[in-house]
Amino acid sequence: MPKMPKHIPPTDDEALASWVESDDFDPNIDDFVDAAPLRRVSAAVEAVERADKQVATEVAAARDAGLSWTVIGAALGVSRQAARQRFAEPARR
């Protein structure tokens, strides 16, 4: 395997693992960054995905309760048509 520069890690998982275990792995502590902001971004994305699923579940429950797309759209802050396009099942459109 060709020698990798110490400051540029390989992108292939196997090569990266090999590089980390080799004598060429000499991390510079100054190159490390705090990953906490990225973890918070990832957590926020997951929260949005969970919220989107919850909204879809609640919209389906509202439809099952007989509420119109006009009322549901108003609750979502969108038009009747936008709500229907986003949440209606193909058979229910």
Image (cartoon, rainbow, N blue to C red):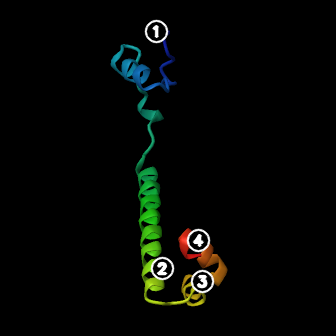
Q: Where is residue 67 shown, x and y percent of the image? A: 50, 90
Query: Gap in Å between the C-alphas at discs 2 and 4?
Result: 10 Å
Residue type (three-letter) at the residue carrying disc 3: Gly
Query: Gap in Å between the C-alphas at discs 4 and 1?
Result: 51 Å
Query: Which label sits in the foreground, 3 or 1?
Result: 3
Of the numbered discs 4 and 3, the one sitting upstream in the chain is 3
Q: Residue at x 42, y 72 (%)?
A: 54
Of the numbered discs 2 and 4, the one sitting upstream in the chain is 2
Residue 26 visible from this viewpoint: no
Q: Where is residue 47 shown, x and y percent of the image? A: 42, 64
Tag 1 residue? 1
Q: At numbered mark 1, what does the secondary structure look like: helix, strand or loop?
A: loop
Q: Residue furthest front?
A: 91
Query: Gap in Å between the C-alphas at discs 4 and 3?
Result: 13 Å
Q: Residues within 10 Å of mark 1 (few under 14, many from 20)?
A: few
Tag 3 residue? 77
Residue type (three-letter) at the residue carrying disc 4: Arg
Q: At numbered mark 2, what does the secondary structure look like: helix, strand or loop?
A: helix
Tag 2 residue? 59
C-beta proximity under 8 Å, tags 2 and 4:
no
- Check the picture and name the quadrant holding the C terminus: bottom right
Query: Gap in Å between the C-alphas at discs 2 and 1?
Result: 56 Å
Residue 37 visible from this viewpoint: yes
Q: At numbered mark 4, what does the secondary structure look like: helix, strand or loop?
A: helix
Q: Residue at x 47, y 65 (%)?
A: 48
Q: Residue at x 59, y 78 (%)?
A: 83
Of the numbered discs 2 and 1, the one sitting upstream in the chain is 1
Q: Residues within 10 Å of mark 3 (few under 14, many from 20)?
A: few
